[in-house]
Structure formats: structure tokens, C-alpha cells
Image: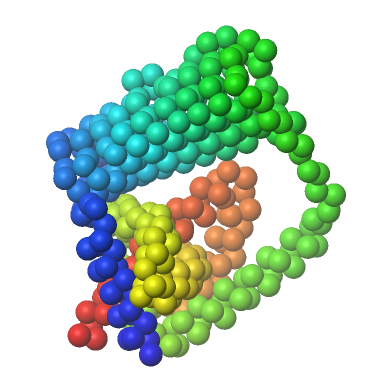
Amino acid sequence: MKNKILKLFSVFLLLFMITNTYAIEVGEAGNIVTQDGEYSSTRFVAGNKVTNNANVDGLSFVAGNEVTLNGKAPYGFYAGNIVTVNENIEKDMFVAGNHVTVGSDAVIGRDAFIAGNTVILKANVTRDLRVGASTVDLSNVTIGGNAYIMADEIILNEKTTITGKLSYVDDSNVTGLNEATIGELEVSKHIENNYSYTFKDKAIDFLLSAIAAFIAMVVLFYLIPKTKEKLDNFKLEFSNIAKTSGIGLIVLILVPIISIIAMISVFLIPLSLITIAIYIISIYLSFLLMYYIVGNIITSKLLNSDNMYLSLLIGIVLVKLIYLIPYIGGFVRFVSLLFGLGLVYKFIINIRKSTE
């Protein structure tokens, strides 16, 4: 049964590769990466400090700590701590980061989707803008369609033009609202959550999720013993981690999109549903794999022990405690998800090859 599911998943990936308009190509990965040239395929680049100057005729995926984008692509998917966009995006742009700046040289042909802590937009958006952040600066820009803003602070001025609707929550601090040119204003009421989530509730949730993760990982090692062996032998080099995380980002974004699109065909609906189920399971597995890897590093390097159960216990507790740290926890959780999904994808491919 396991092999059949793996084959179905592989068939779906093959269908995706065939039906997708652009071929997929995983580019460079490393500490300092600069991408130049022209590529007639979907392209992924990852690193600590990444500069993208390439013209990509496909989906452009760039991830890193400090990301600078100066190239051109039909669609842009960018993630990092500090993200600076001067890219020529022919259609839609998706950006996630701590500090996001979209420079005045950037071109956004259609819609922009941005999530971050601080978002500074200096380029015009042809159609709609959707932003979720702590602070959003829309000074001196023109939004051709609607602007949907979820933020604590929104900055506008007399040179801000929103042709369509500006939508935000009433507890947002908006400056320059009267000076800006806005087609329509929509202010929704903030709904207060009166439920008090006590320390006891948090402790119980932490304990239950830790126990569930421990049991799930033990069962996984029992059902697929080679999983532990592959995790133990995984080379924790930056380039390897970055490339694996890059594959995880591609899987995270593209699999649900293509699954939904495939449902247009009656013949592909069962395959799409199976793929979505495997996708959801893979997301949970991605965190489990990270728990073991972190725990194994500590037990093998510091405690000189190869006890699987001790590695699991230490990894689960430590990583879950890191997740509780504001901002840092969210970033680590996201990186864990990308890295874990990349590992799951690699394991599926390796297992499929070993069964052929």
C-alpha cells in the first residue's frame, strides 16, 4: 500500500511537471549567492545573502536571510529576513519577510501580496495590494485597484493614491488618511477575543503536543526504519540545508495550487485529493523530522549518546520551547517547515527509486 501511495504521488508530480507552463530548475545555494543571466524555466535560489539579477521566464523563487532582487520574472515568490525588491514582476508578486522594502524601481504588473513586520512600498501596484504587517508605509505610491491592509500602523500622505477601496481594521493607527486620494473607504470592526488563555492551558497543550509528536516519531521509525538511518547520515552543511529548504518552499507553494487546478479534470480529482492528504501529512512530518535532527545533534555531539528516544525527547522539548519565543519562534517554525518538507520530498523520491 505504501508503494502505491508513493507511486501515485510521483505520478502527480510528473503530471505537474508536464502540465506546468514552465520547467522547474533548482539553482544555486550557498552562503553568498549572486544569480545572473537568463533562464527559460522556473528557478529557485537560496542562501544567506542572495542577490538576484537574472531574467527568469518562469516562476522565480528566492529565499535567504538578506535578499536583494533586481531581475525580471512573470511571477515572484520571495522570502527572507531583509527583503529588498527592485524586480520587474510582469504579473503577481508574493513576499514574506521581517523587513520588506519594495523599491521605486520595482514594477508590479498585477497584484502584490506581502507579509512582514515592517513593509515599505515605494513602487506602484497596477491592481490590488494585500498586506499583513505591523507597520505599512504607502507614502508616494499609487494602487490601481484595492488595498487590503491588516496592520497596527498605516502610513499615507498627500501623494498616496488608491483608485479602488482601502480596507483596514478600526484599531489600526492610520496617518495621512485625509491627505491621501482614496476611491472608497472600508473600516471593519476589530473583534475582541475575551477568552483568557492561561499558563495552565499553554502547559497542557505543550505537554499533549510533545507526547503526540514523540509517539508519532517512534511509530514512523518502526514502520520505516530507514528514516532514522537517512536522518543520521544527512550532511548538515549550509548549502545542503539551503537547497533542501528551497525544495521545501517549492513543494509548500506549488503542490496545493496544482492540486486545486487539477480538480478541473474529473479524472484527476481522486489523485488531487490523495495528493492533498499526503501534503498535509508531510507538513506534520516536516516538524517531526526537525525535532529528531536537533535532538540527535545534541545527544551525539554533546552527550556522546546514540539513544533514539533521548534524541527525540530533547529535540521535541527544545524546538517547541524555541517556537514560543516571539518573532524568533515564528521564523524558526517557518524554516523548520521548509527544511522538513524538502526532506520528506527527498525521502519519497529515494524510497520510490529503491522500490523500482
**Vertical position of residue 117 compared to residue 215: above or below:** above
Tell me, yes or no, if residue 350 can be seen here: yes
Name the side, left or right, on which 288 lies relative to 7.
right
Name the side, left or right, on which 106 lies relative to 213.
left
Toward which corner of the image does residue 149 lie, by quadrant?
top right
| Front residue of this view, candidates 281 and 65 | 281
Determine the residue positioned at 24% across, 49% down. Answer: 42
**Vertical position of residue 84 compared to residue 155: above or below:** below
Q: Quadrant of the C terminus?
A: bottom left
| Front residue of this view, candidates 96 and 189 | 189
The percent position of residue 105, horizontal first and vertical second, equals: 34, 20
Q: How many marks on residues?
A: 0
The percent position of residue 183, horizontal first and vertical second, equals: 60, 21
The percent position of residue 291, horizontal first and vertical second, equals: 50, 67
Determine the residue positioned at 38% across, 19% down. Answer: 104
Name the side, left or right, on which 122 lies relative to 176.
left
**Vertical position of residue 341 compared to residue 171: above or below:** below
The percent position of residue 299, horizontal first and vertical second, equals: 46, 69
Tell me, yes or no, if residue 296 can be seen here: no
Determine the residue positioned at 58% across, 55% down. Answer: 323
Toward which corner of the image does residue 254 lie, by quadrant?
bottom left
Q: Quadrant of the N terminus?
A: bottom left
Residue sitting farthest toward the bottom: 1
Name the side, left or right, on which 90 lies relative to 54.
right
**Vertical position of residue 254 compared to residue 80: above or below:** below
